[in-house]
Image: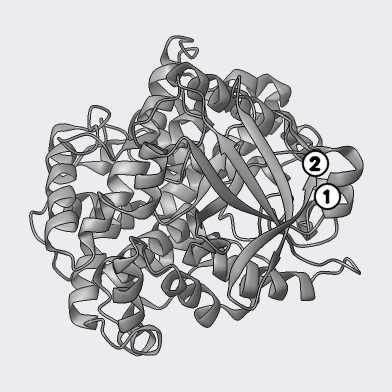
Amino acid sequence: MSDLDPPNPDDLHDMWADAHVSYSSPTGPDTSCLGVTLAEQAATWHARLTETAPNGSLLVHNSMFDTLTNSDVLHLLHVTHSLDRITRHGTLRPSGGCLVGSVYCAPLTSTGDGLRMHNLADYILTEEAPTAVARSPLPGRVPSPLIVEITLPRRCYRGLSGIDYLRLGPIHLRNYLDREFLLGPRERCALHEAVLSRVKNAADFLHLAASIAAAPEPAEHEAFPRLLAQAIPQLPVLGYIYFEALSEYLMLYSRSPQTRRLAELGEFNNRLSKQLLFTGFPGTASHFDLAHFRLDFTRLDEFLARIDPSIEAAHARRHLTARISYLTAARLLGPEAPSRNWNHIRWTFGHAARFFGPLLGHLIHRQLRRFSRYPDFYHFYDQDKAFQAWNYWNQIGIALPFNGTLPKGEVGINPAFPDLRYRVWKAELGEDRLLHPTEELELRLTPRLVGTQHTLMRDRRTSGMRSVRLDDRTLTDSSI
C-alpha cells in the first residue's frame, strides 16, 4: 500500500541517535542526518546562538548541565494532581510527550535550609499547575509537589545528550509502517490521502522555507508571514516549531533584569515562554496544544513589547524568519528534498516520503490519535515508542534524559534504567520559597505509561473532553 521498502531493523538505533542533541560535543550538534547545505547551516546556527546571543553561553554552560555532569545525587521536583492514586498503587509512572517515556521533572538545588526550585519548577508549582487544576472538571484535585532523590550508578553516561521531540518524525513514520496493517486497505488509503493533501496544500511555504534555510544570514521575506499563517492549519507541527523558535529567541535575547538575574544562577528565563503562551492564548492553561499556536507574525512588535520590552522586534522578525525556515527544513524535510522543481514530485505516499518523510511521520502520529479505529489501540503505539526510547537510553547509559530542544530545565527519569537508586518525599513549599520534605513515600518507578483515563483533561475528540496530557508528570509537557 505505501510503496515503501520495509523498515530495516538496524536503522532504529540510528534514528534514536539522530533524535538526540549532543550539548557536550566540542564540535557542536551531530549533523550526519542532514544534507550538506543544512549541515553547514546547523554549524552556523550553533555558532550564532552560542556566541552572539546575549544569553547564548547558557546553551553550553548552565546549572542543569553542571548538575547532570558533576553530581552523583540529584534532587528533582515532580508535580502531580493524583497523589492519592499514586500512593494507593505505590507506583510513579511515566507518560508520553516531549520527554517520550520518562517521568517529567525539573531541577532542585540543595541549600542549607531546603531545596531551591529552578525557575521552571517554581512556575509550574506555583502558577501553572494551580491554574490548570482550577479549570479541571475533576473535583478535589490539588497540585502536589514530590521530591525525587536520584543516586546515579557509576556506569551512567555523564555526557549531555538531550531528546529533541521535533526530530521524532522519522521514528513516527517508521513505527507507523511497522503497524500499518492494523488499518484496513481503505483506511490506509484514506490516511495517506489525508496527510498528502496537507503537505500539498502547504507546499508553497515548505518550498520558501527550504530556500530561506539555505541563505547565510537572517532576513525578512514579504511572503513569509502569509504563507506561515496558511500552512500551520495544514501542518500542525509548524505550531510547535514556531513556538519553540520564538521561545528560544526570547530566552536567548532577553536583556530584562529578571533574565539577567536568572542567567547569573545558570538558568534560562522560562517565564518568558510561559507568558508567550498564556498571554497570547489564555485558554491553553486548560488545553495545552501547540498545534494551535498561530501568533500573527505581522503583529510581533506589539506582542513582544507586552512580553519583554528589552526585545528588539525588527531583529526578532528577521531572526525568526530564518530560524523557523531552518527548523522546518532540518526537522521536517528529508535529505533528498529538492530545492527546485517541486512540481516534479509524484504525490504517491512512497515517493513523497523520500522528500517529506519526517513531516509525514509527524502528521501521521497526530492523525492516528483520532483516525478511524486507531484510537482504540493508539496507546500501544505510544508504549512501543517508549520501549524504544528506554532501550536506547539504557544502551547508552542515560538515566536522566532531558529536553534537548532547548536546555531550559526539563529533566526526565528513565523508569527502565537498571540499578537506579531513588527515594521520594511529599514536600511543602515554605514561606522562604524553598521546598521541604515532609514524608517519605514508598513508591517505585514503573516502566509503564500512565493511562489516558488518569489525565487531568481528556480530548473531546476521542473521549468527550478536550485534553492535554496532564497526568502523573506535570502540567506543561508540550507533547506532539
Question: Is 252 above or below relative to 407?
Answer: below
Is disc 1 in contact with disc 2, using a CB cutoff of under 8 Å?
yes
Q: Quadrant of residue 185?
A: top right
Picture coordinates of residue 430, whole percent (x, y)? 66, 73
Picture coordinates of residue 218, whole percent (x, y)? 14, 64
The mark total stands at 2
Determine whether, in the image, residue 42 is placed left or right of residue 126.
left
Q: Quadrant of residue 20?
A: top left
Q: Quadrant of the N terminus?
A: top right
Amino acid tagged 1 = His
Secondary element at tag 2 = loop
Residue at point 19%, 32% (across, down):
35
Determine whether, in the image, residue 367 is placed left or right of residue 2.
right
Residue at point 83%, 49% (across, down):
454
The residue wearing badge 2 is 451
Determine whether, in the image, residue 121 is placed left or right of residue 454.
left
Residue at point 55%, 42% (across, down):
412
Q: Residues within 10 Å of mark 2 (few under 14, many from 20)?
A: few
The residue wearing badge 1 is 454
Q: CA distance from mark 1 to mark 2?
A: 6 Å
Q: Nearer the viewer, residue 82 or 95?
A: 82
Question: Is 141 above or below relative to 390?
Answer: below
- The label number, if any, that marks residue 405 in the structure image: none
Determine whether, in the image, residue 116 is placed left or right of residue 473.
left
Amino acid tagged 2 = Gly
Question: Is 336 above or below relative to 123?
Answer: above
Q: Residue furthest left?
A: 216
Picture coordinates of residue 262, whole percent (x, y)? 36, 70
Query: Can residue 291 be seen in this snapshot?
Result: yes
Q: Residues within 10 Å of mark 1 (few under 14, many from 20)?
A: some
Q: Nearer the viewer, residue 301 or 207?
A: 301
Query: Can residue 340 be seen in this snapshot?
Result: no
